[in-house]
Image (cartoon, rainbow, N blue to C red):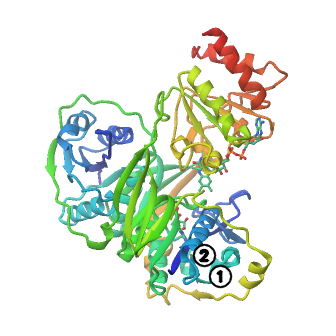
Amino acid sequence: MAIDTIWVLAEQQDGAPVPTALELLTQARAMAGTVKAVTWGGGAEGLAGTLGEYGAQVVYDLGDLGGKLPGPLVAAALAERVRSGDQPDAIFVPTTYDGRDIAGRLSARLDVPVLTNVVGLVEENGELRSEHAVFGGTQIVTARFTGARPGIFVIRAKSFPAESAGGGPASVETLTVPEVGAVSAASVQQRHVEERSGPKLDEADVVVSGGRGLGAAEHYALVEELARLLHGAAGASRAIVDAGWVPYSHQVGQTGKTVKPTLYIACGISGATQHLVGMKGAKHIIAINKDPEAPIFSVADLGIVGDVHKVLPKLIEALKARS
Amino acid sequence: MNVVVCAKQIPDPAAPPALDPERHTLVRDGKLILDDSDAYGVEMGLQLAGDDGEVTLVSMAPNGEVSGLRTALAMGAAKAILVSDEALRGTDALGTAKVLAKAIERVNPDLVIAATESTDGYTGTTPVQLAELLGLPSVTFAKKVTVEGGKVRVERQTEAGYDEVECPLPCVVTVTAGVVEPRYPSFKGIMAAKSKPVEQLTVADLGLSPDEVGFGGARQEIVSVVPAEERGAGEIVTDEGDAHERIIQFLEQLKLI
Ligand SMILES: Cc1cc2nc3c(=O)[nH]c(=O)nc-3n(C[C@H](O)[C@H](O)[C@H](O)COP(=O)(O)OP(=O)(O)OC[C@H]3O[C@@H](n4cnc5c(N)ncnc54)[C@H](O)[C@@H]3O)c2cc1C
Ligand SMILES: Nc1ncnc2c1ncn2[C@@H]1O[C@H](COP(=O)(O)O)[C@@H](O)[C@H]1O
């Protein structure tokens, strides 16, 4: 059985598809003849150009969801579509907050399982197999579905490059969102956007992250200063996000962002498996940690055994002197 | 208010993980502890239940394991339901959700709390699947939760910051680490936990058929486990006051400065 059709959930942010959706479209068009994108939140016509360029022939548009959380509504609309006979072989879902909600709800509605934390996909004997990095990325697990299609794959950011295919705009088809009752009762009252300056964490060429080894919230300024001097973005381990030193949007790792910069600098971060999976894909890694046994050194190209409070100020000083 | 908290019991994450050589799934046969991720849920549940309500733990685990549940009971949960059955070996997230949903239906709570993801499985889909099966709305990734007038108000993490989300009860909420500071069980709590009720149920007790759960129900399999490409061993420099110079050199080599 070949793979003919793949749907890609193309969540939008600031009026454009999230970068992972373009990565997944690129991968989908390499694996299937028919690729359809699914979008919601309004403005589908405006997205059809980009989605088409990356490989979607059709955009299923669910329209504006009126402030409701998308999970139950998008899942219900897609489940209805699948049940009506329009069956994809696979559904690719970016690992985002709403993506996981949709995948979970859709899985329960269709009574099909989901594979999550996918970092690679391969085709074998006409079926898709997913790859998952486990144990801090030291092992790769390959999995397959054994039951009925569609297979739902929730895929991590930066698993594939996004490459334009140069195609024309996708055609937009409207899907109606069915009435689902109580399950869609959650609604957004207000959105809060945290201000950030400089490049985005998951797009920056250089990422400088700080961890508990910084000792106190105010020392995070060292990390920000170094990031600024290198035209990069400042990230964090979960320990200091949980401690409230920095907002969650800075978190790198399993539950945070996946980054693949040219250079990642880890300052006072131990290198827990959940942190490593989010940054191990960096081209180069520098780690500064006072404990020579810290696991972060096992992935570092340059490991500095030292105190961040001594190394960082001197480094910042030296960089300032050059500029 | 009556709250159900999903409490997963997991192998100690500090110990080296073992994989079943045949199925490649995580071996969960030894002693299990309360997943740290769920300690936040237990604390949140205790705070929201208040004096006129209580927290019921719901858990699915092999071998009748209760060690993790005792920890949560010692924190202050009133009772627990444990689903344990040989037929559950190999159950995936959807199967787990089916089991937990059946167990939760017996309690009929005002609110169900789970963690955004477990430490050992981290699919992060179980709670939403559970919500769908129970016909309940859900709010995931809560970093702050309050309840007022039959509604929960949640600050839900987003890519850009957070959203204020409102949802009528009953519903499912998943909480992130750091949402509240979990209390340490007191000595009195630990002693009291020993006699708190833990109801043990099987798949049949829940009215589920064995082929909906376990390896068969999962309808997925692990084909292989291979070591990932290793990063070459790097250079280690012990700082003698001049390590920053080595970093500068490295930055120059990469043409970043
Ligand atoms: C389900 C789950 C999901 C998770 N997701 C994530 C995630 O997405 N991202 C994430 O980062 N973590 C995640 N974690 C948490 C992870 O397990 C670790 O707890 C966390 O990464 C530790 O952060 P840290 O390295 O800053 O702190 P620690 O582990 O406490 O390490 C601090 C380090 O600083 C060093 N140090 C101390 N003082 C100095 C000094 N003066 N100079 C230099 N070095 C110093 C110490 O030697 C130590 O190695 C997750 C955990 C779970 C259970
Ligand atoms: N076996 C289980 N018993 C109790 N709760 C569970 C179980 N599996 C998952 N959960 C709940 O669902 C959350 C997400 O789990 P997961 O889908 O494994 O990431 C967990 O943190 C728990 O709150």
Disc 1 marks which residue? B64
* In the image, the residue with mark 2 has its CB under 8 Å from the nearest atom of ligand 2: yes
Residue A129: x %, y % from top left:
43, 51
Tags 1 and 2 in contact by the CB under 8 Å rule?
yes
The quarter holding residue B15 reads bottom right
Count of marks, rendered view: 2
The structure residue drawn at horizontal position 48% and vertical position 78%, both measured from the top left corner, is: B99
Q: Which mark is residue B61?
A: 2
The quarter holding residue A34 reads top left
A199 left or right of B34? left
A197 left or right of B185? left
Front one among B246 and A245? A245
Q: Is residue B116 above or below residue A119?
A: below
Q: Secondary structure at mark 1?
A: helix
Residue A255: x %, y % from top left:
54, 50
Q: Is residue B234 visible?
A: yes
Which chain is indicated by disc 1? B
Q: Is residue B249 visible?
A: no
Check disc 2 and give the amino acid type: Ala
The structure residue drawn at horizontal position 61% and vertical position 51%, both measured from the top left corner, is: A242
Front one among B171 and A73? B171
Q: Residue furthest top?
A: A322
A134 left or right of B112? right
Residue B222: x %, y % from top left:
51, 58
Check disc 1 and give the amino acid type: Gly
Location of the C terminus of chain B by quadrant is: top right
Front one among B16 and B45? B45
Which chain is indicated by disc 2? B
Residue A30: x %, y % from top left:
32, 39
